Image: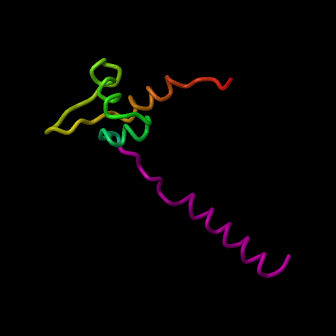
Amino acid sequence: MSMADFNSFRNELINEIKSFFQPQVEQKVWLKSAEVMEILGCSPGTLQNLRVSGVLPFSKMGGTIYYSRKEVMKILEGNQRNAA
């Protein structure tokens, strides 16, 4: 093992150790419509249909609609399909 290989390995190891001690990025609890459409890969019309049909609960505050990340993930997980 050359000195360059050793230094490279050492740097990778140090970076991995640092990552264990850095705080994890917190995920937002409440998402806006654009974020939900990106996560679900749906259009504004589909998102509205999910709201109107009661499939996706939401809260509205000052003209902005918010969705619980937990509820959005339930819908995503509920639509999982086995690969054929």
- Classify the position of the C terminus by image quarter: top right
Is 77 left or right of 10, judged from the image as shown? Answer: left
Residue 42 position (above or below residue 22): above
Viewed as shown, does residue 74 lie left or right of 54?
A: right
Q: Position of residue 41 (x, y in %)?
A: 44, 36
The magenta-colored residue range is 1-28
- Position of the N terminus, as image quadrant, is bottom right
Residue 41 or 69: which is nearer the viewer? 41
2 left or right, relative to 10 = right
Counting labels gives 0
Q: Quadrant of residue 66?
A: top left
| In the rendered image, the vertical position of residue 18 relative to residue 27, given as above or below | below
Q: Nearer the viewer, residue 55 or 69?
A: 55
44 sits left or right of 65 in the view: right
Q: Is residue 21 above or below residue 82?
A: below
Return the residue nearer the eye: 61 or 43: 43
Judged from this view, the residue extending furthest toward the left is 62
- In-front residue for pair 23/84: 84
Task: Determine the main secondary structure of the stretch shown in magenta.
Answer: helix
Q: In the displayed orientation, state which residue is furthest to the right.
A: 1
Q: Residue at x 38, y 28 (%)?
A: 71
Residue beneath the point at 64% across and 69% down: 14
Is 62 inside the magenta-drawn segment? no
Does the stretch in magenta take in 25?
yes
Counting from the top left corner in percent of width and height, residue 6 is at: 77, 76
